[in-house]
Image (tube, rainbow, N blue to C red):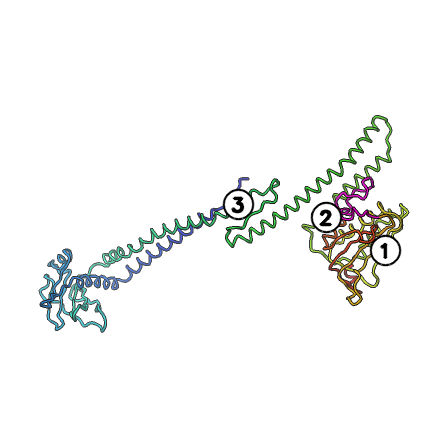
Amino acid sequence: MPRRRGFSLKYRLLISLFVVSAIGIASAAYFAYREVYNTDEAIAERTMQGQTNELLEAIVIDAATGKASFDLPPDWAEAYGRGDGAFAYTFYEPDGAVAAKSPNLTEPLPASALPPGKTFGPLEFRGPEAQMTMTAAAPGGRRLVVARSQVESEALAESMLEESIEPMLLLVPSGILALVTIWLVGSWSLRPLERASREAADVGPGNPNARVSAEGLPAELLPLVGAVNGALDRLSRAYEAERRLTADAAHELRTPLAVLDLRLQRAQLTGEVDWRLVRRDFQHLHRVVAQLLELARMESAARSQPRPVAVNLARVVREATAMVLPLADEAGREIEIEVERDASITFPGYAADLRNMVRNLLDNALHHGRGKISVTLGHAKQEADAQADSGTVVLQVRDEGSGVPDELRETVFDRFRKGKASSAGSGLGLAIVQHVAHTHGGFARVHPSLPNCIEVVLHGVSTKQGSQASAAE
């Protein structure tokens, strides 16, 4: 299946800005067109005001005589001189006398009264041809009357459109500048993301501790980077646990497999098989493989198992002991259980793992201890004035043997660690005990003053009475 390529954020921003700009320019042009073609009178009025302003700017007042004249550009002078009368003007003194008029007029244009405070009067249509006229205020109390033949609306509209298009054309270079700015800012802003991508690509089995740096990244991406680094941390721990388990298993299985191979070679040469030793070797291999699988299962479950539920520890201890009793009877050993009375000790956890922990404690006492095995479960001892429920429970498994040597107190819970290298067992039982204790927020240790006693301390338990205890069971 071909790999699907993702979108480019820079190109997406550019396209979005281009579309928005194009819509804006098109909308402005459309509304300008609508305004021009739907308001004929407004167009005519604006046209007349523009013509009047041209004449007002061309007025020249003689300082000596005070008379007014016009200094018109050649094109306007030509227009006001044509005999068709399309363009005309009349200039009035403050007393109403005609100061000047366009050469094409035989009679002056009549002036209209101006609204108070206004420069331009209203647009008027006079004569049979509906000639457009407008009166405007001039300097010194004078008045200017401008006339123009009415033209087609289309021509006026085209003129107005030409005037409107010019400012809209300024949007084009502004849009291009905005596109270039977006491209540069986008490249600059995404550079840290490209660096983070390269850092993420470097993470692998050969470099499991590499992480994505959050330096320089936008604030919106920091939660994502934190989540990615957290996932990489969890994967790294899982990978390290699997690697360590594989290495330990290969190391521990190498010796019994080699011994079993030698026994089989000897049997092939001599024709005699010591089935007792072969069976013992197979039992040892079976035990090692079973405990390795159990330890791997618990480590994997610790990363994905559901939320813990209330577990009755007293019942768990009794069930695990019942599973081991046949082995104890076969070995001629006695198991004694002592659980704190008048209380049902519950703990939020996983019953199967806790049961496995107790069974491994009992197996350890059976294989490496002597005499009677004592199992004690109860709350931690408190001061005289403390509450009866301490919130901490202690499980002790003790036998009558010599116990763990002082030099092995700290390492006896490591994988494949044995009290005696020649002793039976795989050295995984106490490692499983410690793992379960840690999973449930506690720890396992050799009792400080009793080397033949393994103690598991769990925190956060509660004492339930009556029906509540029955429900927890």
Q: Is most of the magenta stretch helix, strand or loop?
A: loop
Q: CA distance from mark 3 to mark 1?
A: 59 Å
Q: Nearer the viewer, residue 137 or 115?
A: 137
Q: Position of residue 375 (x, y in %)?
A: 84, 54
**Label 2: which residue?**
298
Q: CA distance from mark 3 to mark 2?
A: 34 Å
Give whichever of discs 3 and 2 has the lower sequence position. 3
Question: Which dot marks residue 197?
Answer: 3
**Which region of the structure is painted magenta?**
403-430
Where disc 1 sits, the SS reads strand
Give whichever of discs 3 and 1 has the lower sequence position. 3
Q: Position of residue 431 (x, y in %)?
A: 76, 47
Q: Is residue 31 magenta?
A: no
Where disc 2 sits, the SS reads helix
Q: Is residue 267 depicted above or below 438 in this figure?
A: above
Question: Which dot marks residue 24?
Answer: none
Query: What amino acid type is highlighted by mark number 1?
Result: Ile
Query: What amino acid type is highlighted by mark number 2?
Result: Met
Query: What amino acid type is highlighted by mark number 3?
Result: Ser
Q: Position of residue 13 (x, y in %)?
A: 44, 50
